[in-house]
Image (cartoon, rainbow, N blue to C red):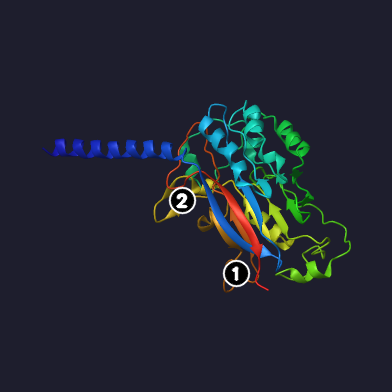
Amino acid sequence: MAARTALTALAAVGAAGAAGLAYAHLESKLFTVRRCTVPVLPPGQPPVRVLHLSDLHLTPSQHTKQDWVRSLAGLAPDVVVNTGDNFGHLRALAPLLDVLGPLMEVPGAFVMGSNDYFAPTFKSPARYLLPDARVQRDDLVPLPTESLAKAFREAGWADLTNRRDTITLRDGRELDLVGMDDPHLDRDVMPEPRAAGPISADADASRSRGATGSDGVRGERDTLLRLGVVHAPYLRVLNQLRADGADLILAGHTHGGQLCLPGIGALVTNCDLDRGRASGLHGWPGPRPDEPGGEDSTWLQVSAGAGTSPYWQLRFACRPEATLLTLTARAA
């Protein structure tokens, strides 16, 4: 009788596990668009819609994901920011350029992630539950990284690989950008500051935090804001971008934890960022700038991304996403 009870319990556990895996596979295809509002622009400025796309990990056979990415152009963003990990397969370049083509007609910027440099390899999913699951390998296969970057640049997107740039919106307003290569591969280098130039008194006065950054040049041009862009939100990089005067930082990499527990959230972030900021809109390093005690913080938005490993297409309590941020004016 006891043996039969034990077998019944094991069968129930096995069935629950199988059901959980089946749902997690289904959830990896339940694509969604997150929306958030960030009061970060100078007072009186009209809104700017920023589409943040990250961690596609696209493969040629993922037709549902391809259709969804292609549909994002219908959101009519003013700017597209791609924070990397586009590839999920050695032969994903052509489908990537196809589905991203409509978005590449919009002003944009990009950085690369580790999975834009090297093809994915099979690994145990248990490794993802380690706090920072980096393993050095000598059998990695290079991807056509430069071909993707060249296509982005030729479309007019700003390449923020350890460099600065400026995006001009269709209405003539400008965004100041600073980005770094992937910290997960230790490729990040903070770009040198631009030489000081004429500073608009209005732009300088509109800044929510002091008039200068660590380089002593807080507002070289009459830009709406300074946007920091990086793939993996390691603390060293977030601190550097904040010190540089970034008003808003966009990052990906974490997959939002990918395998989350309801009521608990992410178990890991795959970097040294705390689990509470695994995805969504937050303040860095303290509360959000519009909350009490957040005056010295900057805005941080971490995308949970839209993909998974091609070998383990599972997400639980963490749907694949793109984020549409509406940047609005701060209170006068």
In which quadrant of the rendered view does residue 5 lie?
top left
Give whichever of 223, 277 is nearer the camera: 223
Q: Residue at x 70, y 67 (%)?
A: 44
Give whichever of 298, 133 is nearer the camera: 298
Q: Residues within 10 Å of mark 1 (few under 14, many from 20)?
A: some
Circles 1 and 2: CB atoms closer than 8 Å: no
Query: Disc 1 marks which amino acid?
Result: Asp
Give the tally of numbered discs. 2
Where's residue 53, x and y in %? 61, 45
Query: Disc 2 marks which amino acid?
Result: Leu
What numbered label is drawn on residue 267?
A: 2
What numbered label is drawn on residue 34?
A: none
In which quadrant of the rendered view does residue 120 lie?
top right
Q: What residue is shown with label 1?
A: 290
**What is the quadrant of the N terminus in the image?**
top left
In which quadrant of the rendered view does residue 95 lie?
top right
Where's residue 249, x and y in %? 66, 56
Where's residue 239, x and y in %? 67, 60
With respect to residue 318, does 154 lie above or below? above
Closer to the chain start, of discs 1 and 2, is 2
User: SS class of the residue under badge 2?
Assistant: loop
